Image (tube, rainbow, N blue to C red):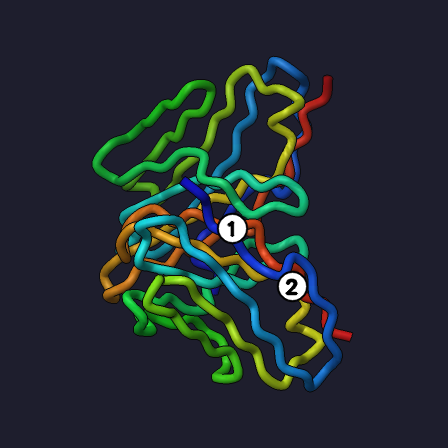
Amino acid sequence: QQQVKQSPQSLIVQKGGISIINCAYENTAFDYFPWYQQFPGKGPALLIAIRPDVSEKKEGRFTISFNKSAKQFSLHIMDSQPGDSATYFCAASSGESGYSTLTFGKGTMLLVSP
Amino acid sequence: ETGVTQSPTHLIKTRGQQVTLRCSSQSGHNTVSWYQQALGQGPQFIFQYYREEENGRGNFPPRFSGLQFPNYSSELNVNALELDDSALYLCASSLERWETQYFGPGTRLLVL
């Protein structure tokens, strides 16, 4: 059972455009929603994260939008650059079981064309 | 401040063998989590260690085991390797159990 569904699988955006990646979750106990960026051959790097008490969080060109009632959250990359080309993972976690484990989506491969 | 480091970077083993992967957590972090990332997939949680004790486990068989040492570094051991164990193994450390997880570069394991 996939608890975090991510779409699209891949995305091509022109330089300067907006990249949008969507995720949906099922477990209402999730209380922390990070986005990770991964370049080939590297480990995932934390990009931005949100907790369900806010509907939006912005850090530079990156914004998370969160809809608790719909159990959905999305990443918006404004003014996308070729250096943003990477795989992006949404994730969710809950501490209710006594430990915090990240449940990841399957990833979105983003290509920003020059 | 050094980040999370893992060794080795790459490893080739044959089916049935055993492997040990190592992780040094970020300075001050007492929690280490291990993940398996198959090609084209998101990371899957294997287990978490907190202050030298296993603190949680994902859906992986007992042949996946681990240790955490007093300096909070950690090992992942996999016995009786199978072809499907070929993956990128990621270690993540956090300041406390529920804090943000920071990932290392991973160890790429190929089982032939």
Kind of residue at badge 2:
Ala
User: What element does badge 1 sit on?
Assistant: loop
Marks 2 and 1, how far apart at CA: 15 Å
- Quarter of the image for residue A110 reads top right
Q: Position of residue B100 (x, y in %)?
A: 34, 46
Disc 1: which chain?
Answer: B
> In this rendering, would A52 be left or right of A84?
left
Label 2 in the same subunit as label 1: yes
Instruction: State the residue in front, A77 or B46.
Output: B46
Q: Position of residue B111 (x, y in %)?
A: 73, 73
> In this rendering, would A43 be left or right of B97?
right
Residue at (49%, 37%) from the top-left corner? A22
Answer above or below: position of B58 versus A114.
Answer: below
- Quarter of the image for residue B80 reads bottom right
Kind of residue at badge 1:
Gly
Determine which residue is flagged by label 2. B87
Residue at (47%, 44%) from the top-left corner? A90
How packed mark 1 is, by other alpha carbons closer than 10 Å (few <14, some 14-19, many 20 or more), is: many
Q: Position of residue A60 (x, y in %)?
A: 42, 19
How packed mark 2 is, by other alpha carbons closer than 10 Å (few <14, some 14-19, many 20 or more), is: many
Disc 2: which chain?
Answer: B
> In this rendering, would A41 be left or right of B32?
right
Residue at (55%, 54%) from the top-left corner? B42
Instruction: State the residue in front, A29 or B103.
Output: B103
